[in-house]
Image: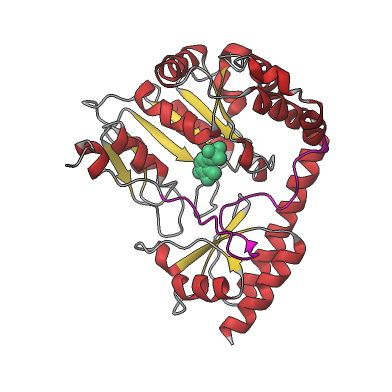
Amino acid sequence: MDFLSRKARAILPYTAGEQLRDRAYIKLNTNENPYPPSPRVAEVLARTEADGLRRYPRPDAGLLRAAVARHEGVLPENVFCGNGSDEVLALSFPAFFDGEGAGACFADLTYSFYEVFAAFFGIPKKIVTLKADFSLDLAAMRAADCQGYYIANPNAPTGVGIGRAEMEAFVASVPQKIVIADEAYMDFFGESLAPLTKKYPNLLVVKTFSKSYSLAGMRCGYAVGDAALIAGLFRMKDCFNSYPVDAVCEAVCAAALEDEAYHTETVARVVSERERLRGELLNMGFTVPKSGANFLFAGRGARSGKEIYTKLKEAGILVRFWDKPVLRDFCRITVGSPAENDALIKQLHSILL
Ligand SMILES: *Cc1c(COP(=O)(O)O)cnc(C)c1O
């Protein structure tokens, strides 16, 4: 007897990066930050009283919502917080797309969760192929028959970013369609569309605490947009989980957000290491698109992504590899600390000998 639904049997779930604990790895495979979160996070955790956890948290994550609103220069009614930006993105599918509609449009090489969510919620997908230089074909996107768009900017796993002016022109050109800008890596690029959500009611910007704030383990992300879009996300949340953001998470993320100096400093370090590492990879003969993220997408012709991934893993260094067309010629390498990057460079030199 198989008790699984047809949907549960048929769907191909998202595969997260390896979280191996069998030995000490230099972990450059899931775009985590090499630096710890703001010291204010540890202070909040030390102050947290267990008794407070008797109570349910705020159903709207009101404390964090207010902090995000201050940070983004919008009102709390323009902010929605969720359990990771993955959850915010998940809820956006049923909130803004119809099963019998024209579908959600996104690139062929992008965050692979979009197609999992589309399949899960029964939303048709419209796939647009990236250009040869890995840039997004915005003209083809504009021409696509669809209900709206998912644009990871900077894109994953390529790292390629689109400037604010080009994105604004795109959003302005499709006023009848929703544009969901997934800005998981935007702090490493600095061209966020969040301020433009006040001007464009069809623009939703989604961000996360996982990457630039070093809080992947906390599971928190948020959306910024017109109050009507935010209300739509709340309607979906309230059909799944009244309290996706727990009390500890709210206080921790608000504290991290308020320590802007620390955030700016750690982001600058990662960006400077990204440029150094890219230079080294280019010197070794890798093809590496210019990255606006905290990772590099690196391929080296005849040496397959799998070979490089496998040999690095044997040496205790984890990077990300996908056995799929185009992607299989590359590895995605998270920018680590200077010492981690040095170890990676050294291993790559010996692999390529
Ligand atoms: C990491 C990532 C996310 C989500 O991360 P959460 O940890 O769920 O907040 C979303 N989009 C892209 C493109 C990512 O790489």
Residue 77, horizontal then vertical, whole percent:
58, 12
Residue 341, horizontal then vertical, whole percent:
70, 66
Residue 335, horizontal then vertical, whole percent:
66, 58
* 189 versus 176 height, above or below: below
Give the main secondary structure, helix, strand or loop, of the magenta stretch: loop
> In the image, 301: left or right of 278?
left
At horizontal 47% and vertical 78% (from top left) the residue drawn is: 303
Q: Quadrant of residue 3?
A: top left
> In the image, 243: left or right of 326?
right
- The magenta region covers 15-39
Is residue 164 in the magenta section? Answer: no
**Considering depth in this image, is 89 or 248 the residue closer to the camera?**
248
Is residue 28 in the magenta section? Answer: yes
Residue 74 in sight from this viewpoint: no
- The total number of labels drawn is 0
Residue 92, horizontal then vertical, whole percent:
42, 26
At horizontal 63% and vertical 64% (from top left) the residue drawn is: 25
**Considering depth in this image, is 32 or 4 the residue closer to the camera?**
4
* 205 versus 63 height, above or below: below
